[in-house]
Image: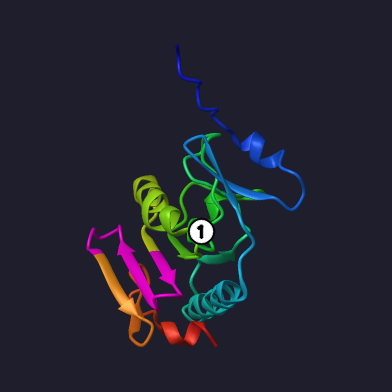
Amino acid sequence: MALPKERIYTIADIYALPEGRRAELIDGRMYMMAPPNTVHQRIVMNLSAEIRDYIRKKRGACEVFPAPFAVFLNQDDKNYVEPDISVICDKQKLTEKGCQGSPDWVIEIVSPGTKHMDYGIKLFKYRNSGVREYWIINPVTGTVNAYDFEHDRGTSQYGFDEEITGCIFEDFIIRGSELMK
């Protein structure tokens, strides 16, 4: 007896979800998303503002987009994510629907139900799709894992009490504790 085939989902399935339901799509597999908690949203807002202010001060061309913001990673119909924060420096990737291709910098804030995704599936997917820098912020452990894919420097792990430095913006520095205020 043959095993039943797993359904392959597409972006059309994402757009067909009922109003208010959110999901991500990685290699044709759909992952439903729960609403974020207050700490998660506080970190997203504070870090988005810090990065935006940094870019403005430097008169940079990059833009910051907090979730929900559509990222069509591989420009196919089987990969769609909504990173907590996306920084895009190539304006040609931006369309009315979102980002066509990989953002330069992606930041995910870990929630209890997203650890497997953020540290595993998304880490692999972001690296292989051309993301230059990836941060995973874990408010429970008070740590930030910063991956520098552009320079292939591996991972730096920071505690919230330490200064966290950027990879693509080398003089961008922030303390994790500032994100919780």
Quarter of the figure that contains the C terminus: bottom right
In reply to whether residue 102 is colored magenta, the answer given is: no
Depth order, front residue of 57/153:
153
Depth order, front residue of 166/115:
115
- Residue drawn at the location 48% of the way across and 79% of the way down: 54
Depth order, front residue of 122/56:
122
Which of the 4 image quadrants contains residue 45?
bottom right
Label 1 environment density (alpha carbons within 10 Å; few <14, some 14–19, many ≥20):
few
Task: Name the residue tied to disc 1.
Answer: 113
**7 above or below 44?**
above
- Secondary structure under tag 1 reads loop
Report the side of 68 relative to 130 (left or right).
Answer: right
Q: Residue furthest right?
A: 19
**116 above or below 11?**
below
Q: Residue furthest top?
A: 1
Quarter of the figure that contains the N terminus: top left
Q: Amino acid at mark 1?
A: Gly
Task: Locate residue 131, reporting x and y percent.
Answer: 39, 54
Depth order, front residue of 77/176:
176
Task: Locate residue 87, reporting x and y percent.
Answer: 49, 63
Task: Locate residue 139, reporting x and y percent.
Answer: 46, 75
Q: Residue furthest left?
A: 153
- Total numbered labels: 1
**How is the structure coloured here?**
rainbow
Report the side of 148 relative to 23 (left or right).
Answer: left
Which of the 4 image quadrants contains residue 25?
top right
- Residue drawn at the location 37% of the way across and 73% of the way down: 144
Which of the 4 image quadrants contains residue 10?
top right
- Residue drawn at the location 37% of the way across and 62% of the way down: 133
Task: Locate residue 9, reporting x and y percent.
Answer: 57, 32
- What span is in magenta? 135-154
